[in-house]
Amino acid sequence: MALVTTKELLIDAQKNGYAVGAFNVENMEMVQAVIAAAEELKSPVIMQTTPSTLKYADADYFYANVATAARKASVPVVMHLDHGSSFELAMKAFRAGYTSIMIDGSHSPFEENIAITKSVVDACHAAGVPVEAELGKVGGKEDDLDGGAGGYTVPSEAAEFVERTGIDSLAPAIGTAHGVYKITPKLDVERLSEIRSLVSVPLVLHGTSGVPDEAVKECIRRGICKVNYATDLRIAFTGGVTEYLKENPTAIDPKKYNSLGREKVKEYVMSKMMVCGSNGKG
Ligand code: 13P
Ligand code: ZN
């Protein structure tokens, strides 16, 4: 089927108490792995690319990969820009055909974050494309984007931010971070519930690789509807390729070693779709 938007997927997830997994894809094999997992579990799915992924190969390449996967699939698929770093990049993805856009102005002061977010919302909403934004700072490093130590979202500011920008989903900072955790993160779930009580749009959890599954489920019970995984897909893919090359040191065919990377990503994505409770919802 054709690509769908996050609006319809996340509203259903919010109504029915589950979340949709959003998986960062960085090559064709990862796209194939994610769609295979979604098909096998009959799960809706979001595939997303960061600015640095779009530097590696531009939005048209990734759009073509994901739109092809969606067309062949029986489950709903979204193509989302993750951590859009400027109005220009958001428009590039929008023009390429992305069906969901994140603008991340969380590194700017509150009023500036509102201004850039609102400008993207105005442009995207004219064509029915929903927008995600971030308030507070998810810490750690997402590719080139360094969130530093992070900074929790202030619930009253979240309400004002949603109201003034007109965004469709909000990523609050509640103690997660991008990249590999050195110690198990402690999430401020009370803060999440407070934010939930003040804003009506679906909430998004960033930095989920390495967060214990039970903690993710608790966040979903408290209002998270989209759960982002990136780092662990890289680890799974690289692990598969490394394993293959260790066992077959003379291998030269990328199709051979990439196949095992693809298989490992599929297994990982399936396990996280079960955590999100999106299986059977597609
Ligand atoms: P990690 O996979 O690094 O935890 O982050 C996922 C994410 O938030 C992507 O935007
Ligand atoms: Zn993120």
Image (cartoon, rainbow, N blue to C red):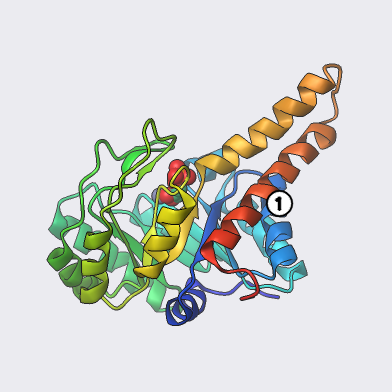
Residue depicted at x 45% and y 55%: 214
Residue 92 visible, this orientation: no
Q: Secondary structure at mark 1?
A: helix
Left or right of residue 130, residue 133 in this image: left
Find residue 78 and report its horizontal and vertical position in percent. 57, 67
Left or right of residue 210, residue 177 in this image: left
Total label count?
Answer: 1
Residue depicted at x 20% and y 66%: 158
* 171 vs 212: above or below: below
Name the quadrant containing residue 57. top right
* 135 vs 120: above or below: above
Find residue 13 and report its horizontal and vertical position in percent. 48, 76
Residue depicted at x 83% and y 37%: 255
Find residue 156 and report its horizontal and vertical position in percent. 13, 67
Find residue 106 and report its horizontal and vertical position in percent. 25, 52
Q: Quadrant of the C terminus?
A: bottom right
Q: Residue under circle 1? A: 33
Left or right of residue 31, residue 15 in this image: left
Name the quadrant containing residue 112. bottom left
Characterize the local packing of mark 1: few (<14), some (14-19) or many (20 or more) Cα atoms within 10 angstroms: many
Q: Nearer the viewer, residue 198 or 253?
A: 198
Mark 1 close to ligand 1, CB under 8 Å: no
Residue depicted at x 19% and y 73%: 164
